[in-house]
Amino acid sequence: MTDILAESVFATSLVLLIFYIFHVGRAKALNKRPGWTWVLAGLCVLSFTSTMHFWRHLDGAAPEGDPDGAWAYQIGQYVVGFLGGMVLLTVGLLRVVADSRRNEQMLTAAVEGISEGLIYFDANDRLVLVNGKIAEMYPLARDVFVSGVSYETCLRTGVETGQWGPEDGDDVETWIRRRLDHHFNPNGAVEFNMPDGRIIRVEERKTRDGGIVGVRADITDLRQARREIEAQRDELEKLNAQKDRFFAIIAHDLKSPFSGLLQFSKMLATRSSSMSPKEISEYGKMLHRASEQAYKLLEDLLDWSRLQLDRMEFEPAAMDAKQAIETSLNRLGPLASAKQITLRNDADLKRRVHADAHMVDTILRNLIDNAIKFTPDRGMITVTSGEVGDFGFIEISDTGVGMDPGKLEKLFRLDQKLSSKGTKGETGTGFGLLLCKELVEKQGGQILVQSTEGRGSAVRFTLPLHPN
């Protein structure tokens, strides 16, 4: 029996020794000295010491007399080997504990170092792990995140503290059931709108042992950045469309009046000797109208381009709107007389407005000229004014052809071509209306158009009243 015991102990020692050598080699390859290496070394020493002792003294009895003290010497060897093995085993166990604590600290540092909130519930829905970011995200409910608490308890506490709550008209119980269903049966990320306006993205997944690990991320800034990018994209598309339209106006609409200028001037230059004075006068008038049309369009284009580049002089001051209206009507009177259109000045704005005189003149010139263009012979254009709160308004109404709702929607948009001929075949680009809108808004006012097809239109714009 003692032989078998000795052989078993020896075999165990040999196996431990081989495993120790393998473990040390692996530890060197990984550049590590884990505590378990020390534990295995201690076990090898203990096992080898015990084997040698039992192998030499199978009966465990000392020889009679032991005259040379050999047996006592061997017992001393055993005791020293045993103590050495115990020291190695103890050091190994202490290092295992230290390594475990260090690994735990590294894991904690890693969990706390991530920018998102991390939370873990075990298979029994008990809170096991949560990092500090969760408490930052949910300050009103931070005290509920303690070890062992259930997810449902977290939900109800958050509702009670006002940290989160029902959305889309749900009652509390329905909302909690929906959240629990998503928690226990996760299916991708879900975004929740918090009462304080933040947007939290929640993504949960099941672990192999049945637990649930969840990641919470505050994506409020991300959503805001996305909205800003989308707004910038829309603005860029709008600017590109305006650029294309602007070049189209330059390439086509500005070319038309110059074509007329070239044609009429060529006829006068080559055929004036064979023309009667009346014919020369008619061609002269047509040449003058083409020149005025080209100049007006060119002037509007230059004003609009300066406005876009913020290089247009803007000097608001107290001005008499009624006098500005009278000046514009007098300037455009001959154009209205040619169509026998009556111009009425019913402006009754007693207070002065705070505006740029040049901009107001450009606005009135464009709006009254537009009204004359689309008013038939013997029609009427009336200009009125008044006060609405802290603003004065000027309204130009006519008895012209009016517009249908489709055309009204395209007004003031450079990306939409809106060019209609007047009642006498007058051409236009619709560019003047866009310029008027931007000039009015530059001065803090608004412009509004009302129109009924076949009955006429009314354009009203507002300007701030001067404080004195």
Image (tube, helix red, strand yellow):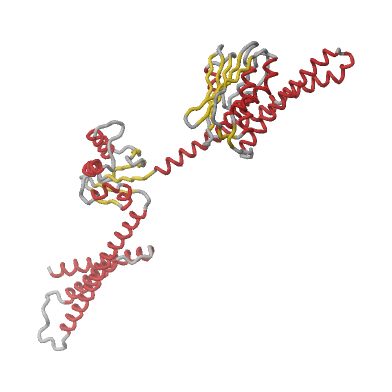
**Would residue 463 be seen by someone viewing this image from the given angle?**
yes
Q: What residue is shown at x 64% (from left), y 36% (from top)? A: 306
Q: What residue is shown at x 36% (from left), y 55% (from top)? A: 113
Q: 201 or 5: which is nearer to us?
A: 201
Question: Measured along the vertical axis of the image, is residue 320 above or below residue 409?
Answer: below
Question: Measured along the vertical axis of the image, is residue 255 above or below residue 86?
Answer: above
The percent coordinates of residue 66 (x first, y second) are: 13, 86
The percent coordinates of residue 200 (x first, y second) are: 35, 42
Q: What residue is shown at x 23% (from left), y 51% (from top)? A: 146
Disc tally is 0
Q: 390 or 153: which is nearer to us?
A: 390
Residue 284 quadrant: top right
Left or right: residue 220 compared with residue 51: right
**Would residue 414 be seen by someone viewing this image from the given angle?**
no
Left or right: residue 118 compared with residue 433: left
Q: 326 or 152: which is nearer to us?
A: 326
The percent coordinates of residue 114 (x first, y second) are: 37, 52
Residue that sits furthest to the right in the current view: 273
Question: Measured along the vertical axis of the image, is residue 121 above or below residue 92?
Answer: above
Query: Quadrant location of the N terminus?
Result: bottom left
